[in-house]
Image: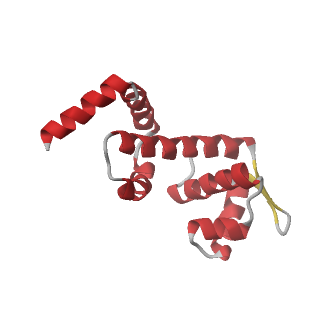
Amino acid sequence: MPTPTMEDYIEQIYILMETKGYARVSAIAEALQVQPSSVTKMVQKLDKDDYLNYEKYQGLILTPKGKKVGERLVYRHELLEKFLQIIGVNEENIYTDVEGIEHHLSWNSIDRIGSLVQFLEDPERLEQLKSFQINKE
């Protein structure tokens, strides 16, 4: 299992590859707000652990294992954002809150939140939740 830091890198690499078609050390460093040397060290570790293939000066690509993990991490992030939106968390807090909790939940909890999000996406249930919240204020 990747560490939370490794997860952040894999997630960002996956996003860059999906949006730009490639992921360079400089772009990863900028996105994660770290030094390029830190990215190079982590990329070498991720290569060693078979999450990606990296050749110095040639770039990198996610392995099937890395791609699968990246997809799951992006799903987790987007799901938690959606969940916080549904329950009425202020937009300005959502990103920070997701970053604060995403590494501390088990995949079982993520799956249960996914089920709850699907349940609450029903317009009638969503309206009931909003009415309940208004009455509690």
- Which residue, as the protein is rendered here, is positioned at the far left? 136
- Which residue, as the protein is rendered here, is positioned at the far right? 58
| 95 shown above or below 36 | above
Residue drawn where x is 62% and y is 76% of the image: 35
| 63 shown above or below 107 | below
Q: Is residue 4 left or right of residue 39?
A: left
Quadrant of res 117: top left
Where residue 3 sits in the image (x, y, percent)?
53, 55
Residue drawn where x is 54% and y is 60% of the image: 5
- Of residues 62 and 12, the one nearer the viewer is 12
| 111 shown above or below 64 | above
Where residue 62 sits in the image (x, y, percent)?
74, 49
Q: Is residue 67 left or right of residue 120?
A: right
Asked if one can make out residue 43 in the rendered structure from this viewpoint, the answer is yes
Q: What colour scheme was applied to this rendering of the protein?
A: secondary structure
Residue drawn where x is 66% and y is 40% of the image: 68
- The total number of labels drawn is 0
Where residue 65 sits in the image (x, y, percent)?
69, 42
Residue drawn where x is 57% and y is 45% of the image: 74
